[in-house]
Amino acid sequence: MIPLRLLALACLAMSTACHAQTGSLAITVTTADASPVAEAVIVAVPHDAAAMANAKPRAEELEQVDKEFVPKVKPVFVGSTVAFPNRDSVRHHVYSFSPAKRFELPLYAGVPAQPVLFDKPGVVVLGCNIHDWMIGYVYVSESPWFAKTGADGRALIADLPARAYTVRVWHPQLTVGEETTAKPIEIVAGKRSEAVWSVALKPEVRVRRAPTATHSGHY
């Protein structure tokens, strides 16, 4: 039997060797006037598709809180499942008519019995049949390496295997096709690369939120 101390050292050595073969990518996304762009999805697609052979889908969640989808933008790896727990005291009716995934979760409270499988890459726009102002997005990535910018317009994709990638940006208000943002980026083992995008965004158009009801009800 291998002593626990030696086993721990071997695991540490394997982990260190693995990280030595990877790099990272720091991303900044702004508008033309240098304002940070939040909730932009950045996807790194390796030129060598074999690099994704061992990538595994995950079980994810996208909540409904205060009659909004939280988060508004949820990137997931293709093949992942997403549960839609309702944290509100009212019921929601979540649906999408997007080609990448058409589904419907009829009126429910709590957590639906089954999560939704997102088995095709693309953008899935979410809505609620009861609350028209509720809009959300599931971005289904064909690559397991992606990130989403924070309020400061920055994001980091860590543990990227060292190789060549095509990296692109998506945002729900982007004025151009996502493919036009693509950049070739080489990731070097043990180093952090940087990439900057300046994008143009359309004004956000939203249905006005209904006033708070003064009486109790199911919706």
Image (spheres, grey):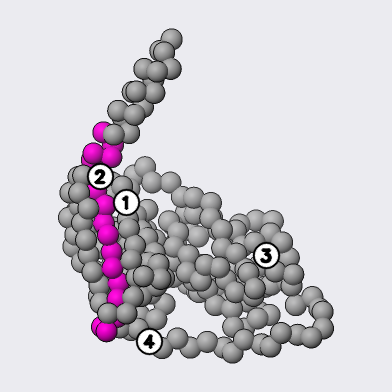
Inter-mark Cα distance, 2 to 1: 8 Å
For label 4, the crowd category at 10 Å Cα-Cα, with few meaning under 14, some 14 to 19 and many 20 or more, is: few
Disc 3 + disc 1, Cβ < 8 Å = no
Residue drawn at (40%, 18%) of the image: 5
Disc 4 + disc 2, Cβ < 8 Å = no
The x, y position of residue 51, in whole percent, is: 28, 46
Label 2 is placed on what type of residue? Thr
Residue 7 at least partly seen:
yes
Residue drawn at (23%, 39%) of the image: 20
Disc 2 + disc 1, Cβ < 8 Å = yes
Residue under label 2: 22
Inter-mark Cα distance, 4 to 2: 36 Å
Q: Which residue range is magenta in the image?
A: 17-33
The tag earlier along the polypeptide, 3 or 2, is: 2
**Looking at the image, residue 171 lies above or below residue 4:** below
The tag earlier along the polypeptide, 2 or 1, is: 2
The tag earlier along the polypeptide, 4 or 2, is: 2
Element type at mark 4: loop
For label 1, the crowd category at 10 Å Cα-Cα, with few meaning under 14, some 14 to 19 and many 20 or more, is: some
| Relative depth, front residue between 192 and 90 | 192
Label 1 is placed on what type of residue? Ala
Does residue 25 belong to the magenta stretch?
yes
Residue under label 1: 158
Instruction: Report the quarter where the N terminus lies.
Output: top left
